[in-house]
Amino acid sequence: MYMDPLLAFVITLALITIVSLWYRISPFFTLIGGAVLFGLLAGITPDATMLGIIAGIGKVFSAFGIIILCGAVIARLLQEQHQIEEIVTDIRRYVKNPPVMAGVSGYLLAVPITCCITAYIMLNPILDSIEKDRTRRNVLLYLAAVGSIISYALIYPTPVVIPLYDAFSGGVSPLLFDAVAIPLSILVLGGILLYFRFARSDAVIPTNTELPAIPKENSGVEIPALQPGIHLRAWAPFVAILIAIPVAFLLLNLSHASMINFIMLVGAVTAIALASPKERTRGLSQGAKHAGLIIFDICGAGALGFVIVTSGFAQITLSQLTLLIPIILVPFILAALIETAQGSRVVTAVITAEVLAGSSVVGAIHPIPLILLICAGSCVVSYVTDPFFWLVQRTTGDDVKTVVKNYTLPIALAGIGIFIVAVALEYMVFQ
């Protein structure tokens, strides 16, 4: 059987969406099933389809395995030692406003932990203790979620940006990319904070500057709101990662891919070395379990992306699309479709990178705007297929309509803002 690759792609995305919504099973299985379906619809032999699935899984695992495992271990060890509370205490020493503190905390933690959902889960009990009023507490939770997504979707190196950078950088330094992405992400976060402050008439924004102490879970001990000094031990893994960057470049002369794995290993080793034996054992075990869930979902995306590329989708379909819509819209729309179908920004980045690599789109758009366009597309539809959406709904206790207003809509506005900046950069700076 042979079907036009574009039609096969649309059918595959539609079925992935339906299965995700109906059965709510692991994305790994829906994506592997989608890879098999697409291969059969596109006329790829069963053997070639399975070999493509295996190759796609291996390619993604080799790229992300160390990074995600290290991030998960760091996160779990910090959590076991109640050091996330200490980090938040340090942040609010300088950031007095609770909504800003919540957004900044999510923004800062998502990148080194390599997972925006993990950062949110870690912040959830802390924000609960800061604000007891349900409506005000929920505002903090929404801002922590949105803040974590903004940095996770934009800043190198995160699992969202790494596959895009590897596929499209064209020799552009990651420092140059982050010189654009970091100010842009801060600007977008500021816009979201203003959105909650002025545009949401149904959201009560806490503005008190006197914040209560954060209790250490199960310890019976409280961390004072403003302790003197910085909790250096809590920040040590992140400091080690920063120090390892010039070491990797200047002393070891590592490539970008090697550097990312090296610095994350340094951060994980630092966290492991500073933990007590009991906390170390529990943190490593729980971190490995959590990393496994994340890695396998991303590997499923690699399998689907590799099979799509094997079909010749990019050469056949993208050339047709560029006749119908401006070429600068192609990466944005493609990423938005993939994100809508399965809900994971990392999966969206992996599949979009696979599909667009080697296509005419890559040569027509400068690498920095191209990456930003895909990042923007990954944000515009964060709805029922997004596992983060349901996590936020459960933790806030709000109805779906309210979650859409305070989670889906702000992220969509962030995506539109990123899209506008990417288009402006392409035509006004990099043209």
Image (cartoon, rainbow, N blue to C red):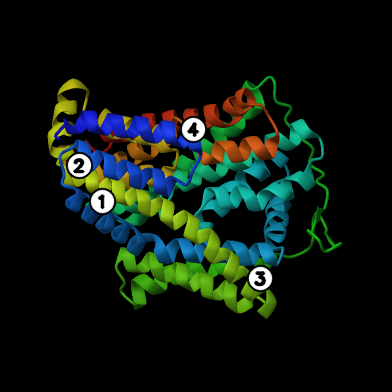
The residue tagged 1 is 167
First along the sequence among labels 1 and 4: 4
Nearer the observer, 356 or 389 = 389
Instruction: Tell me the quarter of the picture where residue 80 sits.
Output: bottom right
Q: Residues within 10 Å of mark 2 (few under 14, many from 20)?
A: some
Q: CA distance from mark 3 to mark 1?
A: 36 Å
Residue found at x 30% / y 46%: 304
Figure check: 273 above or below 305: below
First along the sequence among labels 3 and 2: 3
Left or right of residue 155, residue 312 in this image:
left
* Residue 249 percent location from the top left of the image: 35, 70
* Residue 241 percent location from the top left of the image: 49, 67
* Residue 23 percent location from the top left of the image: 49, 37
First along the sequence among labels 2 and 1: 1
Instruction: Tell me the quarter of the picture where residue 142 sits.
Output: top right
- Name the kind of residue labelled 1 in the image: Ala
Residue found at x 45% / y 36%: 20
- Count how many numbered circles sit on residues in the image: 4
Q: CA distance from mark 1 to mark 4?
A: 33 Å
* Residue 134 percent location from the top left of the image: 78, 34
Residue found at x 32% / y 51%: 302
The residue tagged 4 is 22
Nearer the observer, 377 or 245 = 377
Residue found at x 82% / y 44%: 210
Disc nearest the viewer among 1 and 4:
4
Left or right of residue 212, residue 46 in this image:
left
Nearer the observer, 419 or 79 = 79
The residue tagged 2 is 362
Figure check: 218 above or below 357: below
First along the sequence among labels 3 and 4: 4
Q: CA distance from mark 2 to mark 1?
A: 9 Å
